[in-house]
Image (cartoon, rainbow, N blue to C red):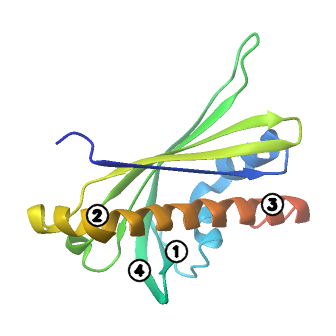
């Protein structure tokens, strides 16, 4: 079946790339935690709440996020640096009911004062054929909305935190 369903989302941070990269390099997991407004952290993973609204229904699930790797390609002659954050998340409770998301967050400069955050992830619906059918009907739209909310929350947090010069992350 390959990697599973693909989801992409992006947002911009009107801050210099170097500042955004440093925040993520220092504590990507903490940035994700604070961006998703969770208070509970563990050493290797963090429980965070992802919320999404579909019509009048708001869905929320505690997730366990883990950062697998944070690296930077230096960018050579004529090429710009790119930061890569590999991450995974799954439901903190009953993970067998929800998909495991594997993703890369690429961060790169657009201008001297603007940085793009580009999320590219894959997931496989749980529960075999039943899960695939549910994903085709509504699940994929929920996953897309959840990823979009996550990326928007991270970008918003970075905009505010970098302006403050906060040493929280």
Distance (Cα) linking label 2 and label 3: 30 Å
For disc 1, the marked residue is: 41
Residue sitting at 65 percent across and 67 percent down? 153
Label 1 crowd (10 A; few <14 / some 14-19 / many >=20): some
Q: Secondary structure at mark 4?
A: strand
Which one is earlier in the sequence, the residue at label 1 or at label 2?
1
Front of the two marks 3 and 1? 3
Label 3 crowd (10 A; few <14 / some 14-19 / many >=20): some
Residue 169, how many percent across, how many down?
Answer: 71, 62
Q: Secondary structure at mark 3?
A: helix
Distance (Cα) linking label 1 and label 4: 16 Å
Which is nearer the eye, 144 or 33?
Answer: 144
For disc 4, the marked residue is: 61
Q: Secondary structure at mark 2?
A: loop
Quadrant for residue 167, please give it: bottom right
Residue 123, how many percent across, how many down?
Answer: 31, 54
Asked whether residue 59 appears in the rendered view, the answer is yes
Number of the label disc, if any, that sits on residue 159: 3
Quadrant for residue 17, please give it: top right
Which one is earlier in the sequence, the residue at label 3 or at label 4?
4
Residue 145 higher or lower than 72, as above or below:
below
Residue 137, how many percent across, how many down?
Answer: 27, 68
Residue 59, how many percent across, how many down?
Answer: 43, 83
Which one is earlier in the sequence, the residue at label 2 or at label 3?
2
Residue sitting at 32 percent across and 68 percent down? 139
Residue sitting at 41 percent across and 80 percent down? 61
Q: Secondary structure at mark 1?
A: loop
Answer yes or no: do the residues labelled 1 and 2 have beta carbons within 8 Å? no
Distance (Cα) linking label 3 and label 1: 22 Å
Which one is earlier in the sequence, the residue at label 1 or at label 4?
1
For disc 2, the marked residue is: 99
């Amino acid at each position: 079946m390959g990697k599973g369903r693909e989801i992409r989302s992006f947002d911009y941070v009107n801050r210099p790339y170097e500042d955004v990269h440093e925040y993520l390099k220092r504590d990507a997991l903490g940035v994700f935690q604070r961006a998703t407004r969770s208070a509970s952290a563990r050493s290797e993973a963090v429980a965070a709440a992802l919320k999404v609204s579909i019509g009048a229904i708001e869905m929320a699930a505690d997730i366990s996020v883990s950062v697998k790797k944070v690296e930077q390609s230096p960018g050579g002659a004529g090429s710009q640096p790119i930061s890569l954050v590999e991450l995974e998340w799954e439901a903190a409770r009953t993970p067998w009911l929800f998909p495991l998301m594997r993703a890369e967050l690429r961060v790169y400069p657009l201008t001297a004062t603007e940085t793009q955050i580009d999320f590219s992830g894959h997931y496989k619906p749980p529960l075999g054929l039943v899960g695939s059918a549910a994903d085709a009907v509504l699940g994929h739209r929920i996953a897309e909305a959840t990823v979009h909310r996550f990326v928007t929350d991270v970008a918003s947090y970075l905009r505010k935190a970098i302006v403050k010069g906060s040493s929280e992350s």
